[in-house]
């Protein structure tokens, strides 16, 4: 690495420089961004990011030229670290990404800790990086888009369910956390949330709740952009799945937002979640792109680092 480049922890004052870095990177790799200042602040507030405590930046002559986002996710029985590295296009091939990678690996001590990262299938440099370290492809996130919602068939759940936007997100945080933790427990990207942590997450989202017989049965979290909307998360209590409730919930949310060609809805779904993929297709969502999730243990990555990057 260039001797003029230093690696240090992220600072609060780096926010605008991070936004600028993302803009540069997105000009070459659109899947990387861009990111607005409010979005960056919101991202740092997520419980697993701990205000960026484990994030690292690369700096040259006072200019931020690289970033490693690093979050530790509580998955119940164990933890996993999620890693994302962004380097300014003009500073690539200076081993900045490798230096940031080393800094993140040094945070933990457990060689068995799982490290995950996401790479777009159409990003050759990113795919080459994970291949060099021996990361294993465990699943893909399928980006899907809906411009014309298709109404689902009427089911027993449709006759019994009440679906409405939550007026007080803190009041439903405990039930949302309970359903999230049960529905996503087997997901590769699972993150266990306490009611207090979920309350913090919900303050940044629009929350829709599905109830049956006075019992919260499912939820849908959405976020709006200038000309589109995102479904960030949707889940139904496992004991109430298979009756069409999730499909009805998503359709009601799409209808409430007047989804159309001019105002589409986007979401990401795991390639391993066949039931969800089937539901979204029935609602009018169509696959647009694939982002691959890779995984390896910290010990495996350190060994690969020593073999290939002396």
Image (tube, rainbow, N blue to C red):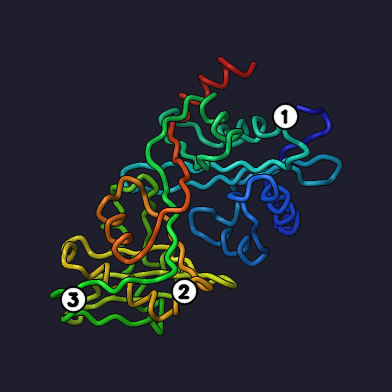
Identify the mark nearer the N-term, 3 or 2.
3
How many C-alpha atoms fall within 10 Å of the one at disc 2: few (<14), some, or many (≥20)?
A: some
Q: State how far apart marks 3 and 2 are (Cα).
A: 23 Å
**Residue 236 horizontal/vertical position (percent):** 26, 65
Marker disc for residue 260: 2
Identify the mark nearer the N-term, 2 or 1.
1
**Residue 177 horizontal/vertical position (percent):** 33, 64
Viewer can see residue 13: yes
Marker disc for residue 234: none
Q: State how far apart marks 2 and 1 are (Cα).
A: 42 Å
145 with respect to 151 (left or right): right
Q: On screen, 111 above or below 39?
A: above
**Residue 306 horizontal/vertical position (percent):** 57, 17
Quadrant where the N terminus lies?
A: top right
153 with respect to 115 (left or right): left
Q: Residue furthest bottom?
A: 167
Identify the mark nearer the N-term, 1 or 3.
1
Looking at the rendered image, the disc whose residue lies closer to the viewer, 2 or 1, is 2
Q: On screen, 118 above or below 151?
A: above
Query: Residue visible at 47% across and 49% down?
Result: 289
Q: Which residue is mark 3?
A: 154
Which quadrant holds residue 216? bottom left
262 with respect to 63 (left or right): left
């Amino acid at each position: 690495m260039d001797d003029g480049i230093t690696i240090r922890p992220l600072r609060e004052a780096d926010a605008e420089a991070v936004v600028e870095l993302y803009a540069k990177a997105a000009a070459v790799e659109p899947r990387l961004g861009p990111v607005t200042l409010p979005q960056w602040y919101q991202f740092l507030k997520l419980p697993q990011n701990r205000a960026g405590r484990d994030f690292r930046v690369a700096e040259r002559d006072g200019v931020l030229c690289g970033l490693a986002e690093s979050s530790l996710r509580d998955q119940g029985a164990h933890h996993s670290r999620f890693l994302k590295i962004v380097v300014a296009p003009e500073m690539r091939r200076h081993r900045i990404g490798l230096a940031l990678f080393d800094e993140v690996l040094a945070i933990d001590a457990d060689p068995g800790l799982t490290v995950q990262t996401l790479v777009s299938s159409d990003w050759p440099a990113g795919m080459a990086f994970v291949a060099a370290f021996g990361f294993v492809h465990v699943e893909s996130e399928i980006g899907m888009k809906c411009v014309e919602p298709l109404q689902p068939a009427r089911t027993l759940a449709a006759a019994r369910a009440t679906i409405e936007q939550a007026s007080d997100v803190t009041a439903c945080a405990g039930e949302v956390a309970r359903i999230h933790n049960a529905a996503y427990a087997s997901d590769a990207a699972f993150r266990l949330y306490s009611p207090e942590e979920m309350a913090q997450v919900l303050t940044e989202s629009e929350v829709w709740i599905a109830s049956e017989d006075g019992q919260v049965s499912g939820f849908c979290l959405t976020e709006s952009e200038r000309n589109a909307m995102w479904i960030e998360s949707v889940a139904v209590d496992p004991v109430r799945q298979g009756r069409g409730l999730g499909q009805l919930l998503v359709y009601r949310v799409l209808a409430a937002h007047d989804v159309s060609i001019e105002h589409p809805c986007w979401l990401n779904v795991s390639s391993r979640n066949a039931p969800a993929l089937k539901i979204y297709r029935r609602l009018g969502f169509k696959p647009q792109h694939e982002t691959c999730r890779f995984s390896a243990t910290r010990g495996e990555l350190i060994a690969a680092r020593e073999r290939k990057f002396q």
